[in-house]
Amino acid sequence: MNTSAPAASASDAPAVNSTAREARGNHVAVSARATRGARQKGQALSSVRTWRAQDPQGANELIVRAYTVASGRRAIGATVRLIALAIVVLSGCHRALPSPATQAAPVAAVVPAAPPTRYAARVVARIPHDAEAFTQGLAFHEGALYESTGLRGRSSVRVLNATTGAVTRRRAVSDEHFAEGLTVLGDRVFQITYQTHTCFVYDAATLEPVATHTYPGEGWGLTHDGRSLIMSDGTDTLRFLDPTNFAERRLLRVTDHGAPVDQLNELEMVEGEVFANVWHHDRIARIDPLTGRVVAWIDLPFSRASQGLEEPEAVLNGIAYEPSTRRLLVTGKLWPAVF
């Protein structure tokens, strides 16, 4: 499945106004180093000004540089971000600084975040899928699909042929557990459970169990960023966990234009962003893992109804990414196909 993005519309960089009382001296050009640094990042440098000012005692020189930088286009998505920078450099710091009454700090305009971009997904292939599999997690690893299936008494971890959808390896999960999200980190498969606070760890090559971890609360979706496991629990918060002991490293609250996005479910890390489906919705959120902001939504062209399924819980719940082809693979609970 590919996603097609609308063309990005450029906007002007916000003005940055800086003043310094008692300012005098010559207007000088911004340093070549700042200019070169901006150009190396594909950025446009504009409105560059430098002022020099002296405090009333003439002991300390205040240099104020203000400039704007418009960043280049990101690799994924079409949003142009505008960055405003104001740099204040003080020299002669061995003497007392001027009082607030003798200088004015640079003032930067506050620009609201742009609304998330919307993408429409296009189906490019269809892979057969076990229509009895209550899919809870999906991941692509070394040419194969790894899947976690749920429901008590029917939960399993399995490996699928990525071309035919055939199950090539399977291990059942004990009946008291309702298996949930899954991810593959290194040579280990991590599979969490819904309400029994347990993560099973398997050898990726054999699916033999190698460890278990516990955690508080519910487990829904799971992915990783190469260093931490990232887990959802049905709320608007993602947990970043140490894969060696499940210690909590940080929490990330997910928002869309400031409003919380809850019921986050299946997760997948895709080129530096966390992709998440929202329970009972046919769209995927693209989340900035540093800020928690939803930067885009991907609307999917299929749903439970389009699959001809009457089961209310037969909803979207599997996201996998194939880096070599940049294909996104999605499926759902009891769906007969992976798209």
Image (cartoon, helix red, strand yellow):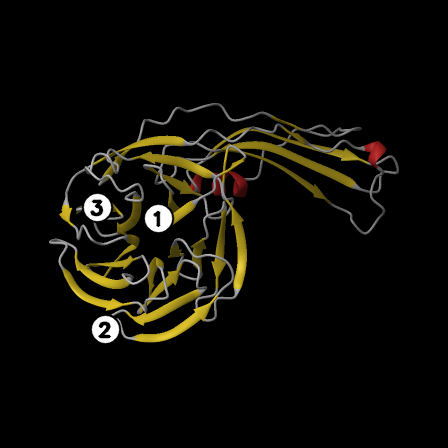
Say which amino acid is labelled 1: Glu
Q: Is residue 273 something one can see in this rendering?
A: no
Q: CA distance from mark 3 to mark 2?
A: 26 Å
Say which amino acid is labelled 2: Thr
Q: Nearer the viewer, residue 48 or 26?
A: 48
217 shown above or below 202: above
User: In the picture, residue 200 is in which quadrant?
Assistant: bottom left
User: In the picture, residue 53 is in which quadrant?
Assistant: top right
Q: Nearer the viewer, residue 47 or 164?
A: 164
Which residue does the numbered mark 3 point to in the structure image? 335
Q: Nearer the viewer, residue 224 or 221?
A: 221
Element class at badge 2 = loop
Residue 266 falls left or right of residue 323: right
Work out whether mark 3 precedes mark 2 in sequence or the reverse, and give the earlier one. 2
Residue 85 image point, x, y percent? 59, 36
Q: CA distance from mark 2 to mark 1?
A: 28 Å
Residue 227 image point, x, y percent? 43, 62
Which residue does the numbered mark 1 point to in the structure image? 271
User: In the picture, residue 27 is in which quadrant?
Assistant: top right
127 shown above or below 105: below
